[in-house]
Every structure is written in structure tokens, then in C-alpha cells.
Image (cartoon, rainbow, N blue to C red):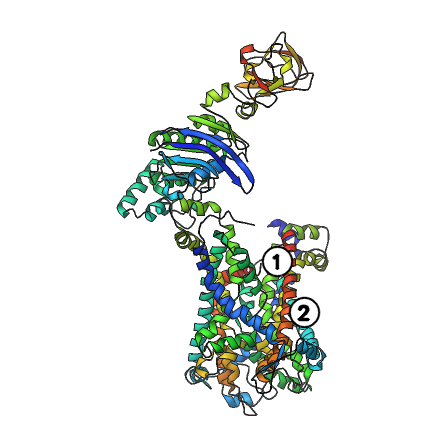
Amino acid sequence: MEKRVTFKGIWLPLLLVLPQLVVTAVFFFYPAGQAVYQSLFIPDPFGLSMKWVGLGNFEYLLGNSYYRASFVTTAVFSTLVTVVSMGVALYLAVLADRLIKGSGVYRTLLIWPYAVAPAVAGVLWLFMFNTRVGVVTWYLGVLGYDWNHVLNGEEAMGLVVVASAWGRISYNFLFFLAALQAIPRSVVEAAAIDGARFWTRFRTIVWPLLSPTTFFLLVVNIVYAFFETFGVIHTITGGGPQQSTTILVYKVFSDGFVAQDLGSSAAQSVILLVIVGALTIVQFKFIERRVHY
Amino acid sequence: MATVSLKGITKSFGKTEVIHGIDLDIADGELIVIVGPSGCGKSTLLRMVAGLETVTGGEVQIGGTRVNELEPMDRDIAMVFQNYALYPHMSVFDNMAYGLKIAGTPKAEIAERVGEAATLLQLEPYLKRRPRELSGGQRQRVAMGRAIVRKPSVFLFDEPLSNLDAKLRVQMRLEIKQLQRRLGVTSLYVTHDQVEAMTLADRMIVMNAGRADQIGAPLEVYTNPQTEFVASFIGSPPMNFLPAKMAGDAPRGAATLGIRPEHVKIAQSGVQGTVLYTEALGAETLVHIDLPDATRVTVRQDAAAPPPREGETVSLEWDAGDRIFFDAQGSRC
Amino acid sequence: MAGVDSGMVEKRGLGRWMTHLGLIIGLLFIFFPIWLAFVASTVTQPEIVKPPMPLLPGGHFFENYRRALVSGVNAPVAWMMLNSLIMALGIALGKIVISLLSAFAIVYFKFPGRRLFFWLIFMTLMLPVEVRIVPTYEVVANFGMLNSYSGLIFPLIASATATFLFRQFFMTVPDELAEAARVDGARPMRFFWDILLPMSRTNIAALFVILFIYGWNQYLWPLLITTDPSMNTIVMGIKQMFPSGDDTADWPVIMATSILAMIPPVIVVISMQKLFIRGLVDSEK
């Protein structure tokens, strides 16, 4: 789509795009370029010079069992976060959509977690499951379950998944509710007259009509789980125990800033960059399709 | 007040020429209607006069001065758009005053001029409202008001009535005509509606595929069309076209014989045809007749005359003087 | 509504109560962590460290919050909130301003390099700051912008989501409006200021909500570049309040800070709910 361009001039538009161009060049393209550049070197131990290693950093990474483990961790983590968060959100949205009155009140309450920063969400959940003072830990103890996510990797994973999914429910809920409310009443009524019970109607009519939204949320949630959950992990587990919750973004951070391994961190950035790029392309392809749906 | 002259105007978008040289002289105070089917280039022509499109070739003059290179605001024109183009966030008053405000007109004068225009257009009760709180006809008036307050030398109208319903259109047509007469401002008016063109125009220019097929007073164009296109476009129902060979005395080179529906009479003798159906419109009746060669002829007859039955065979006749002949290229001959 | 009632029998009677019950269970899941944090922020440290802690608020609300706001652990929380506010406002306003300008240029002008520019900023959609974190840190460090507001703000402005949103909106503005303004004598910037900007008010407000929350909730970036406690933002500052080693955390103050950290964005979201939802849905389209 093109607008009938209506104003003349060359300098004015260039001046108008200049601020964005400068900010983007300095804080986006230059660093992104640096990431690619640095990924091809390793610094000497004193940080005085850089040694060209070509794809060496990448080869090293792909051969590194910790890095490969981090891939698996990321896959498990983002799948779980996406499924839990979307599942709960869909369940709540379907219920709220069934109400003729009062869905607005629930909506107002359910969007709270959106405003809660992932890092704060992490602190809230950490507090509940804290090994010493956590309320939930204590009651689990009463029930005979010894919760300790500091030592148990699976429990740690469970905790960061729930805390991350919790913060994302609002977002998914809003999109699902909007999509549900966009389904014409008459379609659902026609099915009801055809004798379909609630569950049948959901399975055969509502769910297929929701599929564009579902797919969109799937992509968006995976991106969320990849990047925006850093705060949750950093506050709750710090990547541990034994790297069992070290997702890729966390590893970029810990290798780059904690271990100061710049070459490896940059190479990881480049790998992430490729993954996000692919996800974005999938998303845009899909949005094109959604227009025609 | 000013004259407008178009001299050999052409327009190309990329390599495609869409307007192929238009010449026109508009007298001071004249209302010229540019009429034609969609895509004939009439809006483009108007927008070139406005300065919203660049002129590829030729010259636009307003008041005797070349304006090709001037910005719209420097051409001393005002324009009424098809969708009115009112600023949605401004009140009616502010919409009308905007141009004056930019020109730095003193506040008191703005108020006075907007007030005058509002009185003229019966908009006073609505000055504080936003465009979305107005009806279609009122919005149309605001758009006119915005043009009037600037006291331009030329009004440009780009299909200003096509977003209104039929009844309002007839009413607004009349108002525009009266307003233009009263203000005496030279006007260019674009429409695809030939009735609008006939009723409004001092002179009309009938455009066809980027060319001006004919320029003239409405009745002159109606009775004396220069091309087959003009003959078919102006007049409703359109002119009947028959093979020229049906007339024994056709001039050399004639391919088509044109005859207006009101000039065809059902008679005792003449060309024979079968009545397909009749349409009684109240004051008149349209009779559609198929000739043996499958040519369709429409006859417009007075409602008082007895209509033939459908399926009946009738004879048609007309005066030789009412016939118009066109050659194979559609030009008059 | 007779048709709806006859078709949707389940919506009445028992079914409706089950629906409410289901939603209330959901609300409990959502609000329990927040409730617990609030309770913890109103009791004393000994009440918390001897589990189980109480589930109803205690009487130390004012004491705990005053302690957090005025002294905090490393820096007064009031100070950190101010930092967060400046950062969030800076990101929201900065991004809106540069995006409005560049979207205006892209939509209403034809200038050399327009397509190139368009694709350049399009690419920025793909890469969150987390991916280019190390080199971006170096750039900011080289500019001497560590521990500064500009260091907190600028790198997070460098993304084009807002530009795309405005571009999309400008495309829906009828061409005739710009032409009418031209005939009225408005130069480009006058049109931008008098017509386009007022027409974009709702979009600007909706985007503001989204960006304010985005800025307020930033964690990793402020964590990296603000080493000076007086520059800490509240969201990252909470983590800094945990003692290293085996000391016991000052839970009442930490939880009071957590509540304080969520109040401004919650107020923004709830009070501008309609705009927020619109902004959310639009910006993802």
C-alpha cells in the first residue's frame, strides 16, 4: 500500500528520520555488527588483543556440552511456559466469554500481572517457595513433601516456569478473550440449535476459529520465554542449580558479564539473533495469512 | 475573480500518458463542469489546476499568470473534496477558519468572514460542533464554507455530491448553483453524473480517455454531440444507435446512425420491430423494441399516448433532420 | 436477546455459578502471590522467618513502607522509584517522539533512501536488547553513559515498533486531509502539528501505556549499567536487596518494595484499561 505522497521536499524528511536513524545506528546496528565481529575472535587472557578464530567460537560452542544443554533447557522451558500460560489463559477467557454480564470485572482483575515486572514476579514466587520462610514450602512440608528448588533442578525449572507463565497470563487472556468475542454469536447459536453441547461446540467451532490467534500467541510466547524471562530466572535461581535453568539468554549474560568470555558470548548472541530472526519471519508470514483468513 | 486557461495540458504517470492535451479558456465567473466516466482523467485535470498534481506538459494560467510551479496555497483557489476532507478534531468554525488562520488573518476578520459564510450556508447553529456530529448535507455545507471564507478567485469541486443520497443531491445541486451565481466566482466542477453536469454547467467539457471530446453549453452538447461517445454519455436513456445503412441517404463514410429516444415515434409504417417491454415512468413511457438485426431501440413517448403491448410488432419512424451520423471512428460526419 | 437465551441454556442457573467458580479459582491463582507479598509487607521480620507466616495483614504497614521508601537497603526506594519514573517516561516519550517524526516522513514524503530506511528500521523489530547486550554495553560505556539516565533510556528507544504503529495509522488517514491542508496553505510541519498529531491522540496515549510499562519493568539493562545504587531502578533494586551469602533477607522491606514496584504500572494499566488493550492489540498487528 502506498500513499499518494503529498508533500515535496528532501531535506525535511531526512531531518525527520534523522533522530531515529542516529539512535538506531548507534545503539542497534553498531552493537549488532560488533556482536557478529566479536564472535569471530577470542581475546587474550589480559584483554589486550583479539585473535581471529573464524568460526572457532561457534564450533567450540556447538561442541560444548553446557551450551547444548542450555539449548535443551531453553526448549523445555519455553514449551512449558507457553503451554501453561496459554492453557490457563484460554480456560479463563472461555469462562469469561460465557458471562453475559461481569466479564469486564474479571478482565480488570486479570490484567494485573501484565503490569508486574518479570523480576518482581520472580521475587513474589521465590518468596512463596523460599526454602526457609516460604509459605507453600512449609505447607508442602506438612504434607510430607520436601521442596528444595535450590538443590533440585526439576523443582527449580518448575518454579521458574510457573512464575514466568503467571506473568504472561494477562496478555494471552486479553487476546483470547478478544478473539472469542469476535466470533459471531450466530455461528455458535447455529451449532447449539444443531444440538452440539458446549464441549462439542468448543472443539468443532470455537477452537478452529481461534487458530489464528492461537498460532500468533504461540510465536509471541516463545519469544517472550526466550528473552523477557531473564528477570524471573535471575531473581529465582540464577541459572542453577547446576545450570538446570540456564536458558540461552541467561548464558549470554553469564558468559559475557560474569565469566567475561566475550567471544563466546558474542557468538551466542549471533546464534540467538538467527533464532529470533527466524521466529520473526514466521510471525510475519503468518500475519499475512491472517489477513486472508 | 479570475479567468482560467488550460493550454495543451498533458499528464503522464511514469510512461503512461493519461491526459493527452486539453485546451480550455474559462471566462471570469463561469461555471465549467468536467464530466466523463470514471478513469477518464477528469479528477486528474482538476487536481492539476489545484496544484495537487504536477503538470507534465502545457500551461495552467489563473488570472493570466502561469501557475504550473506554484503551491496550491499560492494559486488563490479553494477546493471542495468528494469526501469533504473536514478535519475531524476541529469544530465547524475551526475547519472554516483554518486557512485564514494560517494566512495570519486577524481574529476579528476571521470571525466575521466565517460568520458570513455560516449565515449564507445556514450553518450558524452548528459552528461549535465536530464534523462527525453533522449530517452528510451539513458536512457538505461546511466543506463549501471552508472554500468560501477564503474568497478565492477560483472554486474547484471534485465530485462534491457523490457521497449524498439522491434527494439531497438534487437539493445541494441547486444550492451550489445559486451560491456560485451569487458569488460570481469562476468554478471548475468535476462529476461523473451527466444530469448534474447538464443542470449546473454554463459550459461543459465531456472527457473520454484523457481527451476533451466536446466543450460547449449543455444543450448544445446534447443536441449536437460531436462524437458517438458524447452522444451516448449525455442523455438518459442514451441515444439509439443503428447501422447507418438503414438510412438510404447516409453520408459517405457514415457507420452509425444516432437518434434520440424522444425523436422516435411509433407509427403506421417504417422500420419494423418487436416490443420487448415497456417502462411507465409516470410522465412518460419508455418502450424498448428489438429490430430484426437485434439492435435495441428505445422510444420515449408521452404517458398519454397508448403504450403498445409486449410482443407486438410495431413500426418506427423519425424525422430525417433529427438523425446524426458518425463514422467508424465515432466522429461526427 | 430471546434468541441468545434459548440457544445458550447453559448460561443460566447452575452453569453460571460454575463459570463464576472457575474464574474465581483463576483469580486466586493470579492474586495469591500478590496477596502474600502484601501481607508480608505489613508484618514483622520475626513473624516471617518463623513459618508459617500469617495469611492476614498485620499492623506494621506504615512502619515497613516508611522504612523502605526512606532508607531501603542500599538506597531509598523513593529514590529508585524516581529513577524508574524518569527511565519509563524517557523511553515512552522518546520513542513516541522519534517514531512520530520518522513515520510522518515515511508516509508523507518521497525522499531518496526511503525504502532503505524503512527496511533498516524493520530489521530492528527482530532483535531485543538482550541479544546484543554485550556490545551495547560497550557502546554505552564508551560514551561514558554508565550510571546515567541517557544510558538507561537511549538503547531501549532503538526499536521500530512504534514507528510501525504510527505508519499504519497514518496510512488510514484520508489523503484528502493532507490535500485540503495544502490548499488551506499548511506547510508540512504545520499539517503535522495541527492535523496529524491531534488525530493521533488516542494512538499516542495507547502506545504510551505500553511503553511506560515496558520501560518501568526493565531489568537486565539497568542491572548492567547502573552500578551506583543511587541510579538503581526499583525493579532491579529489589534483587540487590537480597544479602549475599547466608544472611536472612529483610523480607518486610523487600516485599513492601515489590508492592511499590508494581503500583505505578498497575495504576496505569487499570486506569487506562481501554487504551491499553487497544494499544496492545494494535502494536502486535
Sequence-wise first label, 2 or 1: 2
Q: Residue at x 28, y 42 (%)?
A: B112
Regarding mark 2 in the picture, which secondary structure is present there?
Answer: helix
Q: Amino acid at mark 2?
A: Val
- Amino acid carrying label 1: it is Ala
Image mark 1: chain: A
Q: Quadrant of residue B15?
A: top right
- In the image, taking residue A55 as reference, residue B319 lies left or right, namely left
**Image position of A114 with respect to A213: above or below:** below
| Front-most of residues B154 and C84 | B154
Percent x, y for residue A209?
67, 56
Q: Looking at the image, is B178 positioned above or below residue C149?
A: above
In the displayed structure, A78 sits above or below B202; it is below
Which label was assigned to residue A83?
A: 2
Residue at x-position 50% and y-position 74%: C262
Q: Are marks 2 and 1 in contact (CB under 8 Å)?
A: no
Q: Chain of mark 2?
A: A
Query: Toward which corner of the image does residue B267 lie, by quadrant?
Result: top right
B190 or A135: nearer the viewer: B190
Nearest the viewer among C251 and C217 is: C217
Query: In this orientation, does residue C18 appear?
Result: no
The percent position of residue C118, horizontal first and vertical second, equals 54, 58
Which image quarter holds the C terminus of chain C?
bottom right
SS under mark 1: helix
Residue furthest bottom as drawn: C246
Q: Which mark is residue A179?
A: 1
Horizontal side of A64 relative to A118 (left or right) equals right
Residue C105 vs residue A55: left or right?
left
